[in-house]
Amino acid sequence: MKKYLIIVGALCGFLAYTNPGMEEFSTFARSESQAMIRDEVGDTAIGRAVAEFGSSLAGDLADDVTSRKNYVLFSTYAIGDDEPAWRFLGIAGRFVQLDKPDGSTNAD
């Protein structure tokens, strides 16, 4: 029993330590938006420039339009005020998309 408590304690400590903050989410938002923009406009020189500019803007604005709920072991992020277009789970230094703007989930 003691061994299980040590394992659970170590796992909880790891998750708490690697719980991503807003700075990590801003970096994530920047890279994800760059990929989304590049998919839309194409991988040309102009497309790359537009994607770089758009992703930089998205990363800078992520703090202003994103709300974070910190649950110590993980965090949830919602982009938008009233009805978030995107929702993400941040856990173990990673981000998992939960909801998309069209209402579908990542599991669809």
Image (tube, helix red, strand yellow):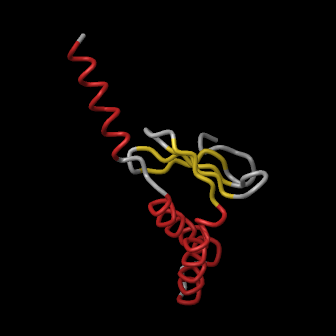
Q: Quadrant of the C terminus?
A: top right
State whether residue 61 is above or below residue 81. below
The image quarter containing residue 62 is bottom right
Q: Nearer the viewer, residue 12 or 101?
A: 12
State whether residue 99 is above or below residue 12. below
Q: Position of residue 23 (x, y in %)?
A: 46, 63
Q: How many marks?
A: 0
Q: Residue at x 43, y 52 (%)?
A: 20
Residue extending farthest top: 1
Q: Is residue 24 left or right of residue 77?
A: left
Q: Quadrant of the N terminus?
A: top left
The image quarter containing residue 56 is bottom right
Q: Residue at x 27, y 19 (%)?
A: 5
Q: Position of residue 73 (x, y in %)?
A: 43, 38
Residue extending farthest left: 3
State whether residue 73 is above or below residue 100. above
Q: Position of residue 92 (x, y in %)?
A: 38, 45
Q: Residue at x 39, y 50 (%)?
A: 93
Q: Nearer the viewer, residue 2 or 34?
A: 2
Residue extending farthest right: 82
